[in-house]
């Protein structure tokens, strides 16, 4: 009997250290759990590539996922086209940097993930975004050497997140656990 093609999900990784390690752990768990029902293609922004190397997890991503691309420019790899052609059930960007959140909110498609997200929205492909931070105020983030770094999220950053949350077919996730619920909703 002919084997049916599995649905695919595009997972974008932006250059955010906050929640990066927890997100990878969650995506590894999800990949194992849904191995038979969905394929996960990984798209990493140029800054994301730098950040995963900084955190020493690029090998772990390579060994756990099969299809991985790193941004060359906004249209290379041509994720925007693949999304618009309906190749993916949805696009997930996790963790998403304040930079990529701002670009999508302001409709600036000059990077791989922002361009693909905006083009996907125009084709009504669902978009799920987990910002590295989402509340005004101080967050203490862990640096790869274990040291703490204090960061203050501005109102302007949160406004951008709220803009995204108000867009059609666009959903903001808060924690890696929300990604688990997302896959359960689609594929269980
Ligand atoms: C080690 C490291 C960690 C970073 N962590 C964050 C973060 O948690 N959140 C964030 O918004 N930006 C963070 N940045 C800054 C982004 O990488 C930077 O804004 C970059 O332009 C984002 O590009 P992208 O949105 O195309 O991935 C970090 C940068 C480095 C080098």
Image: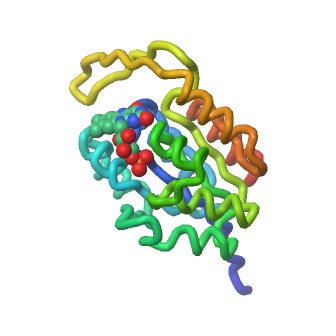
Nearer the observer, 90 or 179: 90
**Residue 144 falls in image quadrant:** top left
Kindly tell me whether residue 36 is visible in this rendering.
Answer: no
User: Where is 81 relative to 130, above or below?
Assistant: below
Instruction: Give the colouring mode of the picture.
Output: rainbow
**Ligand 1, what quadrant?**
top left
Q: Is residue 118 left or right of residue 114?
A: right
User: Where is 78 relative to 179, above or below?
Assistant: below
Q: In this view, does 47 lie to the left or right of 22?
A: left
Query: Residue extending furthest left?
Result: 145
Image location (x, y in percent) of residue 188? 76, 50
Identity of the residue drawn at 60% across and 43% down = 129
Identity of the residue drawn at 67% across and 67% down = 7
Q: Is residue 7 left or right of residue 116?
A: right
Image location (x, y in percent) of residue 105? 60, 44
Q: Which quadrant is the N terminus positioned in?
A: bottom right
**Residue 101 falls in image quadrant:** top right
Image location (x, y in percent) of residue 122? 71, 63
């Amino acid at each position: 009997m002919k084997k049916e093609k599995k649905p695919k999900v595009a997972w974008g990784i932006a250059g955010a250290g906050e929640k990066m390690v927890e997100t990878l752990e969650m995506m590894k768990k999800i990949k194992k759990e849904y191995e038979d029902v969905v394929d996960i293609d990984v798209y990493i922004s140029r800054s994301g590539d730098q950040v995963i190397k900084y955190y020493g997890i690029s090998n772990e991503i390579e060994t756990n996922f099969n299809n991985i691309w790193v941004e060359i420019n906004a249209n290379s790899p041509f994720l925007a086209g693949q999304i618009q052609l309906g190749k993916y059930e949805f696009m997930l960007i996790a963790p998403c940097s304040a930079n990529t959140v701002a670009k999508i909110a302001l409709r600036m498609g000059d990077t791989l993930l922002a361009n693909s997200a905006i083009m996907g929205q125009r084709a009504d492909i669902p978009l799920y975004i987990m910002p590295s931070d989402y509340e005004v105020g101080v967050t203490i983030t862990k640096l790869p050497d274990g040291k703490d770094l204090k960061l203050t999220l501005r109102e302007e950053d949160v406004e951008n997140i709220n803009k995204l949350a108000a867009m059609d077919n666009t959903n903001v996730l808060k924690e890696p656990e929300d990604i688990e619920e997302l896959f359960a909703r689609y594929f269980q």
